[in-house]
Amino acid sequence: MADIAEIQRDITELQKFEAESTRSRVKDILAVQIRKLQTDLKRHEAELRGASSSSDALSEKGTVSLPRTPVYTEIIKNYAWDQSDNFLKLYVTLKGIHSLSKDHVSCEFADQSLKLYVRGLEDRNWELHIAKLSEKIVPSESIFKVKTDMVLLMAKKRESGKKWTYVTEQEKKAKEPKKPSLDEKEDPSAGIMKLLKDMYDDGDDEMKRSIQKAMYESQSKQSKGDFGI
């Protein structure tokens, strides 16, 4: 693109020659050239205005946004653990995590839960969420450390010296034996039936035979109108 200032100077020079010329044919040739340059000048000015408008539009919108590929979040399910008198320790293996910047790894501790967040490792995010620990912790004294290919979570025990048998409340409920309970708020007969059912489900063969016999005798008495009173 020719320089606009140069075109303007050419037009001015030709107009000067046109004014000084005394021959009509020369004036006509100069006039044609002047009009041609004036047309070029208007075209260049229009192109310059268009480029300026595009630049302003980009400045207002910022950089052009390209379509973003959704980032996948991988849920962490496996970890190792041990404990000291003061801390529950979780070891989460993530290859290459030590190469991330510090702001890409974070952990939130609550009274009885924790969340580990890792962003941008192997083109995805990673998350470990334990919604309910088996025991309470002290969030303000709980920490995490990034090591080579691993994150160490150190949850401060609320009760120092207490040994944790399980990490999560879910594990605790699933593995500890169920204890028969009689809810006083329930209808007494419904509570007894629930208690008998729990004893039957958890009992050995002799216990089951005894319960079956007791149930049979109870039903026989009720059918005869004898309630044992």
Image (tube, rainbow, N blue to C red):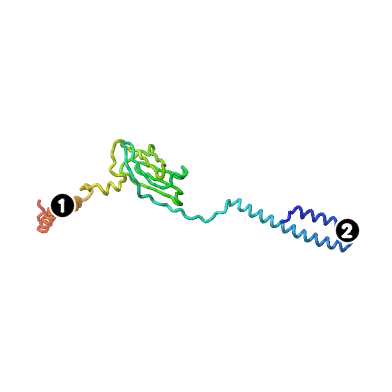
Residue 68 horizontal side relative to residue 34, left or right: left
Secondary structure at badge 1 equals loop
Point out which mark residue 132 bears: none
Residue shown at 79% from the left, 61% from the top = 35
Quarter holding the N terminus? bottom right
Mark 2, Cα crowd under 10 Å, few <14 / some 14-19 / many 20+, is few
Above or below residue 21? Residue 160 is above
Secondary structure at badge 2 equals loop
Point out which mark residue 204 bears: 1
* Amino acid under disc 1: Asp
Residue 125: x and y in percent read 43, 50
Point out which mark residue 21 bears: 2
In this orientation, which residue lies closer to the viewer: 33 or 219? Answer: 33
Residue 47: x and y in percent read 69, 57
Residue 133 horizontal side relative to residue 5, left or right: left
In this orientation, which residue lies closer to the viewer: 57 or 150? Answer: 150
Residue at far right of view: 22
Mark 1, Cα crowd under 10 Å, few <14 / some 14-19 / many 20+, is few
Residue 93: x and y in percent read 38, 46
Residue 161: x and y in percent read 29, 36
* Amino acid under disc 2: Ser
Task: Locate residue 20: give its quadrant.
Answer: bottom right
Above or below residue 32? Residue 116 is above
